[in-house]
C-alpha cells in the first residue's frame, strides 16, 4: 500500500479502536443479562469508597412493550438502557415501577417521566420519596396489585418491613420469578449491606412471609450482586440470624 493508503488504514484502525473503547466503556457501565423467557436483569454501578458497587434492576419484554422493574442507579445509564432495549428488542419501555424509595430503585423516575413513560410505586414508597427527596412516581397503588401488560401478568406484594419500611417484592407466577429487590440479599453477600433504614426486628418475619407466599420460586433476583441460585431467601435469613445481637 502507498503512503496515503497507509494513512487511511491507520485512521480506520484508530476509529474502530475508539469505537471499541466507547463500546467497552458503555458496556462496563450497563450490563444486561438474559434471565429466562422474556426476562432480563440489568446492572449499573456506583463508586463506593473506590469500589464499583453493582445494583440490579430487571425488565420484561411484553407484546405491548418492555416493563422496567426499578431504574438504573447510575444516572448516566437511563438513556443507554432505553437504547439497548430498543436495539435488542425493537420495542419501547411502556411502564417503570420501583420496589422501594431509595435512589438505587427510583433515580431514573424523572428522566423516564420526561420520555412519557408511566411510572409507578406503592403509596408508601410514593410518600417516602417525597419525605426523603427522592424521585417520585407519577402513579401509586395502595394495596398489593396485579398488573396485566400485554401477555404479561405480575403481582406486587408487601410482606412487611425489612431493608426499608416500604420494600415490596414482585411475583411472576407463570415463570416462577421472584423479584426481591433490596429486601433479599444475594448468596454472594456476606453482610446485610446498607441497614440505615432497615427494620432488623421485623426483617426475618418478613422474609418468612415471602417464603410462605411463594414457596417454589425458580429464580430469585436480589437488589445487588448475583442470582445464580434460588437460595437467596434462605441466605438472607442466615445473615439476619448472624446479625442478631447476642
Ligand atoms: Zn439497594
Image: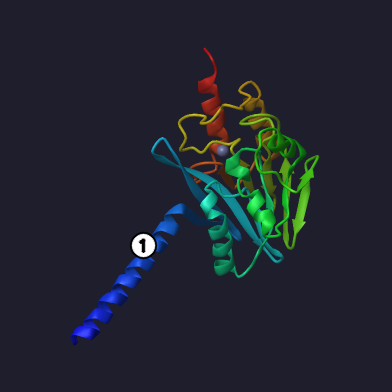
x and y percentages locating residue 89 in the rendered image: 59, 68
Q: Residue furthest top?
A: 246
Q: Is residue 75 above or below residue 60?
A: above
Q: Residue furthest right?
A: 142
Is residue 175 visible in the rendered image? The answer is: no
x and y percentages locating residue 132 in the rendered image: 66, 33
Neighbour tally class for label 1: few under 14, some 14-19, many 20 plus, Cα within 10 Å: few
x and y percentages locating residue 62 in the rendered image: 68, 63
Which quadrant, please, contains the N terminus?
Answer: bottom left
Q: Is residue 244 above or below residue 107?
A: above
Q: On the rendered structure, is 217 left or right of 120? A: left
Query: Quadrant location of residue 79?
Result: bottom right
Cβ of mark 1 under 8 Å from ligand 1: the answer is no
User: Quick check: which quadrant has ligand 1?
Assistant: top right
Query: Quadrant location of residue 16?
Result: bottom left
Q: Residue furthest bottom?
A: 2
Q: Residue at x 55, y 53 (%)?
A: 41
In this orientation, which residue lies closer to the viewer: 224 or 171? 224
Q: Residue at x 35, y 66 (%)?
A: 18
x and y percentages locating residue 72 in the rendered image: 56, 49
- Which residue is label 1 attached to? 21
Q: What kind of element bears circle 1?
A: helix
Amino acid at each position: 500500500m502507498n503512503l496515503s493508503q497507509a494513512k487511511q488504514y491507520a485512521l480506520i484502525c484508530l476509529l474502530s479502536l475508539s469505537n471499541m473503547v466507547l463500546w467497552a466503556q458503555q458496556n462496563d457501565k450497563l450490563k444486561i443479562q438474559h434471565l429466562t423467557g422474556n426476562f432480563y436483569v440489568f446492572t449499573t454501578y456506583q463508586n463506593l469508597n473506590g469500589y464499583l458497587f453493582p445494583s440490579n434492576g430487571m425488565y420484561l419484554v411484553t407484546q405491548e412493550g418492555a416493563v422496567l422493574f426499578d431504574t438504573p442507579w447510575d444516572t448516566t445509564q437511563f438513556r443507554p438502557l432505553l437504547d439497548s432495549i430498543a436495539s435488542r428488542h425493537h420495542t419501547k419501555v411502556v411502564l417503570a415501577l420501583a420496589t422501594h424509595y431509595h435512589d438505587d430503585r427510583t433515580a431514573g423516575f424523572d428522566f423516564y417521566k420526561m420520555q412519557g413513560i408511566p411510572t409507578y410505586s406503592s403509596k408508601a414508597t410514593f410518600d417516602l420519596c417525597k419525605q426523603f427527596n427522592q424521585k417520585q412516581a407519577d402513579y401509586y397503588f395502595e394495596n398489593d396489585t396485579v398488573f396485566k401488560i400485554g401477555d404479561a401478568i405480575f403481582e406486587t406484594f408487601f410482606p412487611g418491613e425489612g431493608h426499608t419500611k416500604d420494600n415490596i417484592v414482585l411475583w411472576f407466577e407463570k415463570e416462577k420469578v421472584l423479584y426481591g429487590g433490596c429486601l433479599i440479599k444475594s448468596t454472594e453477600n456476606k453482610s446485610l449491606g446498607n441497614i440505615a433504614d432497615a427494620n432488623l426486628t421485623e426483617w426475618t418475619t418478613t422474609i418468612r412471609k415471602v417464603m410462605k407466599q411463594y414457596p417454589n420460586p425458580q429464580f430469585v433476583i436480589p437488589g445487588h450482586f448475583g442470582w445464580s441460585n434460588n437460595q437467596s431467601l434462605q441466605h438472607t435469613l442466615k445473615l439476619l440470624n448472624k446479625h442478631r445481637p447476642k
